[in-house]
Image: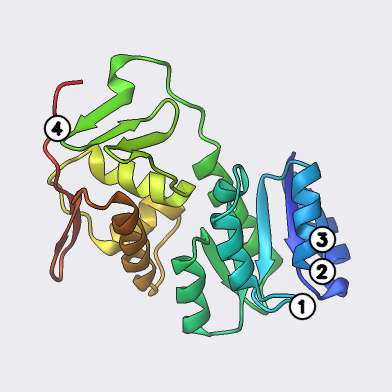
Amino acid sequence: MHRLLLIDDDEALAAPLTQYLARFDFELSAVTRPSAALQRLASEPFDALILDGMLPEMDGFAFCKQLRGGQAPWREIPILMLTARGDLTDRVVGLELGADDYLAKPFEPRELAARLQTILRRTRRAPAPASPSTLMCFDGLQIDTTRRQVTSAAGLLELTSTEYELLTLLAREPGRVFTRDEILNRLRGQEADLYTRAVDILVSRLRKKLEPVEALKTLRNAGYCFALPEVAS
């Protein structure tokens, strides 16, 4: 059973959504304000958040930013943002602030369940058995796939689950060019939609966290690749 926290000021949404998501082994709790969400997060474990973009006290985007800059484990908890219908700006902002996925309102509950399942599959993968191959060493960067940790000369990097998955996807095949559609398919586990701008935002976020290491290379009109040389561990 996966525990979810819904943060949405529409109180009528919680009951039917709780009943529907229970079919997919989700246990949903709901609050209407960010302050109440923080209290629940401080006292209970949750596997993912469903966060509305429009909230009292502060909007969902500001709250997403607060969570990503806050204390562990809040920094890494998967976040699915609910955005205004067809509003591309909301999607871009949410992803830039660290959300793992987005869904436009009004939405189909089945699609919400599918996206949550995808996010949790990605973040709940069982670690590989400890062995030398779980440590990937590059010039200026080290990726420990057993602990899901990335370190540079600056120390341990704080990456979201999606940023980590993107980095390891590229690092496992240095020099290979991945198109935006390939990256979307691999990270989401579903067919890519037309919103390939999400990949550009994700790469931009990851680049900033890797600075001054220049690990990601952009090939115009082609895609992205991992550019660091591998070194002996």
Q: What amino acid is at disc 1?
A: Pro
* Disc 1 to disc 2, C-alpha distance: 8 Å
Packing grade of label 1 (10 A; few <14, some 14-19, many >=20) is few
Give 84 or 74, whichever is nearer the viewer.
74
Kind of element beneath mark 2: loop
Q: What amino acid is at disc 3?
A: Ala
Q: Which residue is mark 2?
A: 32
**Quadrant of residue 11 within the rendered picture:** bottom right
Give 213 or 93, whichever is nearer the viewer.
213
Kind of element beneath mark 4: loop
In the displayed structure, 181 sits above or below 44; it is below
Image marks 3 and 2: residues in contact by CB distance under 8 Å: yes
Q: Which residue is mark 3?
A: 36
Q: What amino acid is at disc 2?
A: Thr
Kind of element beneath mark 3: helix
Packing grade of label 4 (10 A; few <14, some 14-19, many >=20) is some
Residue 108 x/y as whole percent: 67, 70
Q: Residue furthest top?
A: 131
In the displayed structure, 133 sits above or below 1; it is above
* Disc 1 to disc 3, C-alpha distance: 11 Å
Kind of element beneath mark 1: loop
